[in-house]
Amino acid sequence: FGPNVIKICQAADVVFMALHGENGENGKIQAAFDLFGIQYTGSRYLGSALAMDKGISKKMFEAAGIPTPHGISMSKAQRGVPFAETGLSLPCVVKPCCGGSSIGVTIVRTADEYEAALDEAFKYENEIVIEDYICGREFSVGVIDMQALPVIEIAPVEGFYDYKNKYKAGSAVETCPADIPEEVAERMKALTVKAFDALKLNVYSRADFLLDAEGNLYCLEMNTLPGMTSASLMPKEAKVAGIEYSALCELIIKKSMEARYSS
């Protein structure tokens, strides 16, 4: 923390958490704020840590009956294990275990690409996740206080929803409510709430999904501090639900303070 940051935060009624990346979302700052007696918005340290680790969250999804791509975790010490012994098949996806914004993520289609993908992912962390590649449409669903928001579809103009397509204007088409059957939307929303509960999250979050051509849904991860600019996914979903941006921020603050004072 920089000079006077803790002192300023302790003087506030509540700190609005809008950090991203490792230290912003992995529970460390939340745990520190708990120790300093600082009230803050969003999930507490345990849920934040569980959701940030894709290897752990995948296991918890599986235990809770939430469909997610089959995959494994791999440490640098296990790097020498042949791909044939991983139990996976090509194509697959290789990504850092605790990264964000799709940094270090590679879709692998050949054995040569696999080795290069390991090199890329291990540049960021000592543990990675390798999982089956699911060809399908990409969706996101926000949840506030155990209530799911309308489903939004993200369709990259080219490639997959990587770092460039997430943050470069015009790189993806976002449609909310998503153009999907009501039954699929309701199933996705129910799985979002279920995943939110399974990871012991609080107040609000956002789930990312893939929908394949056969109608199968796969939950990829839960974002405990989803983007909160007026152009971000969750505020767009909230607006469709009749919640304007300022009201969404107020709701997050209100529910966060209620959760803290009731615990």
Image (tube, rainbow, N blue to C red):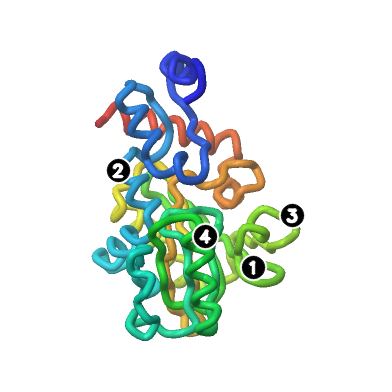
- Mark 4 vs mark 2, CA separation in Å: 23 Å
Q: Are marks 4 and 2 in contact (CB under 8 Å)?
A: no
| Label 2 vs 1, first from the N-terminus | 2
| Label 1 vs 3, first from the N-terminus | 1
Q: Amino acid at mark 2?
A: Leu
Q: Amino acid at mark 1?
A: Ala
Mark linked to residue 169: 3
Residue 208 seen in render: yes
| Label 3 vs 4, first from the N-terminus | 4
Q: What residue appears at the point 31 percent right and 58 percent down from the top-left corner?
A: 56
Q: Residue furthest right?
A: 170
Residue on which the image places disc 1: 155
- Mark 1 vs mark 4, CA separation in Å: 11 Å
Residue 190 seen in render: no
- The x and y percentages for residue 122 are 46, 61
Say which of marks 2 and 1 sits in front: 2
Helix, strand or loop for disc 1:
strand
- Mark 1 vs mark 3, CA separation in Å: 13 Å
- Mark 3 vs mark 4, CA separation in Å: 18 Å
